[in-house]
Amino acid sequence: MFAGTLTKTAHNAAIAYSGMIHSNRFDIAIQLESRNKMSERSPDFDVTAVNKSGRKVRIGTAWNETGNTSGNHYISMQIDVGLGPFRVNAVQTKEAREAKSDEFEIIPLVSNGVMKSGSISGELTAMDADNAFTGYIANMMFDLDFMLIENEFKSEDTHPDYRIEISSPRGKPIRVGSAWMAKSSRTGNDYLSLLINTPDGDLRVNAVQNEEQRGGQTFSIIPFVDSDEQDRTASGGLSLVA
């Protein structure tokens, strides 16, 4: 079960709401940051929080909604802090509406669907030399800084183009995964497909460039979901979520 509060922020165009969400396993401060809508049903907000390493990570998305029966405004949120996805609503009590308050109460919601991968944040940046990349991947339970090092022993098309390495506390390189260069069959854009062994298990992600990043050296890391509409050549039967 989950509980919490959400408050509309004043005089801040980027952060629309801030609050807390609680369970018997965590107490997390969250923010709802406004985002550009690509379609009518695309999210109105990114839900963000700060993990144990002090990194701000995206842990979900949220939508402005109107009750079918009551006509009252509420906010629907889909969140994953690394323990599995869950749905909650932020609603106003009758007293809060009558007082024209900006306070909302967070209540749990049983989801009709299943989010196929957890919420993660990350970036990948091409380095100027050695055909290498540096980056990070994080959620509320882990935070890994890593490098992509060119695989000098690649001899077949299916072999990885890069090995993924992190450093031990003493600075020793530790291989934690592999990465492949790929091209989207839908857009024709280049991206990287990564398989990383995290503390929570193996994780498949893509490193892609949005419109602002295209042509530069920075890539955004986004999760996979199962799909029949996919680029199967390098993604192992998985497709990316925009």
Image (cartoon, rainbow, N blue to C red):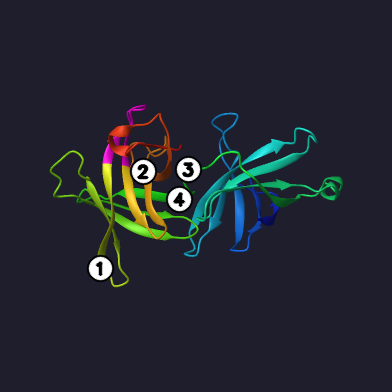
Q: Quadrant of residue 212?
A: top left
Q: CA distance from mark 2 to mark 3?
A: 18 Å
212, above or below 81, in the image: above
Dot placed on the residue nearer the N-terminal end, 1 or 3: 3
Q: Is residue 91 visible?
A: yes
Q: Position of residue 117 (x, y in %)?
A: 46, 46
Q: Quadrant of the N terminus?
A: bottom right
Q: CA distance from mark 4 to mark 2?
A: 11 Å
- The foreground one among 196 and 113 is 113
Residue, disc 3: 116
Dot placed on the residue nearer the N-terminal end, 4 or 1: 4
Residue type indicated by callout 3: Lys
Residue 207 marker = 2
Residue type indicated by callout 2: Ala
Q: Position of residue 211 (x, y in %)?
A: 42, 34
Q: CA distance from mark 1 to mark 3?
A: 34 Å
Q: Is residue 201 left or right of residue 35?
A: left
Q: Which residues are magenta?
A: 181-192
Q: Residues within 10 Å of mark 4 (few under 14, many from 20)?
A: many
Residue, disc 4: 121
SS for dot 1: loop
SS for dot 2: strand
Dot placed on the residue nearer the N-terminal end, 1 or 2: 1
Residue type indicated by callout 1: Lys
Q: Residues within 10 Å of mark 1 (few under 14, many from 20)?
A: few
Q: Is residue 8 visible?
A: no
Dot placed on the residue nearer the N-terminal end, 3 or 4: 3
Q: Is residue 50 left or right of residue 231?
A: right
- The foreground one among 106 and 44 is 106
- Tell us which disc is closer to us: 2 or 3: 3
- The foreground one among 37 and 51 is 51
Residue, disc 1: 172
